[in-house]
Amino acid sequence: MVSKETAAELVEHATQAREKAYARYSNYPVGAALLTKEGQIFTGVNVENSVYPLTVCAERAALFTAVTEGYRSFEAIAVVTRDAGTPCGSCRQVLAEFGLDIEVIIADTKGEIQQITSVAELLPFSFGPDNLDSSDWDAG
Ligand SMILES: [Zn+2]
């Protein structure tokens, strides 16, 4: 579990990021802030598209940015929405790829943390890297 202060810091980053969300179709802006084990914070917002399925969620935007920058170990992610919504199924699966123990902090736009959970709790009986024989994959 991250400290109360770290959780609040992540919520603050997610709240600020949320202002940049491109949510013109859903009008449901989302901000996310992902904390790496090294202490780096990466933010993400939902980026919608007129071809709806091409939309990318805030959680995945943050995670893909972090991976692009060379980070693969994550401690926690804060997600901020107006009603403290939880990550969608796709984001739960993508987060699970990098660890079922990632803490998930759910907050609303008033900065109130409504729930602290984990990827394991959000995605029970998950399918993941251990299901595939990828032991000879060169992680680079
Ligand atoms: Zn999602």
Image (spheres, helix red, strand yellow):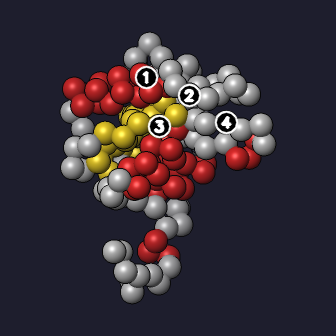
Tell me the residue at 50%/76% (across/down).
131
Per the image, label 1 sits on a secondary structure element best described as helix
Amino acid found under the numbered disc labelled 4: Glu
Identify the disc placed on residue 15: 1
Q: Which residue is mark 2?
A: 21
User: In screen coordinates, is 113 left or right of 31?
Assistant: left
- Amino acid type of disc 1? Thr
113 relative to 116, above or below: above
The answer to whether the residue labelled 2 contacts the one labelled 1, judged by CB atoms less than 8 Å apart, is no
Residue at the spot 44% in from the left edge and 13% down from the top edge: 110
Q: Are marks 2 and 3 in contact (CB under 8 Å)?
A: no
Q: Nearer the viewer, residue 132 or 64?
A: 64
Above or below: residue 79 compared with residue 73? above
| Residue at x-position 46% and y-position 71% | 129
Q: Is mark 3 within 8 Å of ligand 1?
A: no
- Circle on res. 48: 4
Where residue 116 appears, as percent x and y from the top left, is: 38, 34
Residue type of the residue flagged with mark 2: Ala
Q: Going from the N terminus, do you reach mark 3 or mark 1 first? A: 1
The quarter of the picture where residue 6 lies is: top left
Q: Are marks 3 and 1 in contact (CB under 8 Å)?
A: no
- Report the Cα–Cα distance between label 1 and label 4: 18 Å
Q: Quadrant of the N terminus?
A: top left
The residue that mark 3 highlights is 44
The crowding category of the residue bearing disc 1, from other C-alpha atoms within 10 Å (few below 14, some 14 to 19, many at least 20), is: many
Q: x%, y% of residue 23?
A: 65, 28
Tag 2–tag 4 contact (CB < 8 Å): no
Secondary structure under tag 4 reads loop
Residue 131 vertical placement versus 64 (above, below): below
Left or right of 80, for residue 116: left
